[in-house]
Image: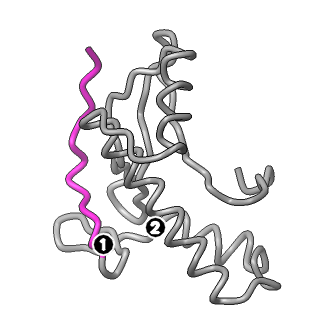
Amino acid sequence: MIKLNDTGVWLDEESHTYWLLGKQLSGITGMLSRQVFPDMYSGVSMAVLNSAAERGKMIHDDLFLYNLTGHISGDHVRMYADMKRKHEIEVIDNEYHVTDYEYFASAIDQVVTIKGKLCLIDVKTTSRLHMDYL
């Protein structure tokens, strides 16, 4: 079985900031949003963005719970469970923190093997997939 190293990075959920040995690190998603895609959601209201963010967090949390316990809390988790079986996906870790140990950190949604091959999964819940962003 593959064992991942603990990077020592922790995420303060309330402020959504990453920390390593008392030093704050920049998150990759926020940096991409500010530097590369600053206008990606410019035409979308804050109410819609907040609602989408809540839904996305709920789905991430439900998938995390399923990976830990096998609990299916809705159709979205049932579809995910079916996909895992169909594609022989084995989860190694959820929300695995990676870092360059100096400036940046990010959480990988899932580190998995798919039919034995090591892969990273970034769960997306947007209404439309933004290929450039991916």
The image shows residue 70, relative to residue 130, as above or below, that is above
Secondary structure mainly formed by the magenta segment: loop
Give me the residue at 24% from left, 25% from top. Answer: 3
Give the side of residue 129 with respect to residue 19, left or right.
right
Q: Which quarter of the rendered picture does the N terminus lie within?
A: top left
Are the residues at dot 2 and dot 1 in contact (C-beta closer than 8 Å)?
Answer: no
Circle number at residue 72: none
Q: Please name the residue that numbered disc 2 is placed on.
A: 27
Magenta span: 1-13
Give me the residue at 57% from left, 81% from top. Answer: 50
Query: Which element is circle 2 on?
Result: strand
Q: Nearer the viewer, residue 113 or 102?
A: 113
Q: Please name the residue that numbered disc 1 is placed on.
A: 13
Quadrant of res 37: bottom right
Q: Does 75 appear in magenta?
A: no
Give me the residue at 35% from left, 45% from top. Answer: 64
Which amino acid is tagged 2? Gly
Query: Which element is circle 1 on?
Result: loop
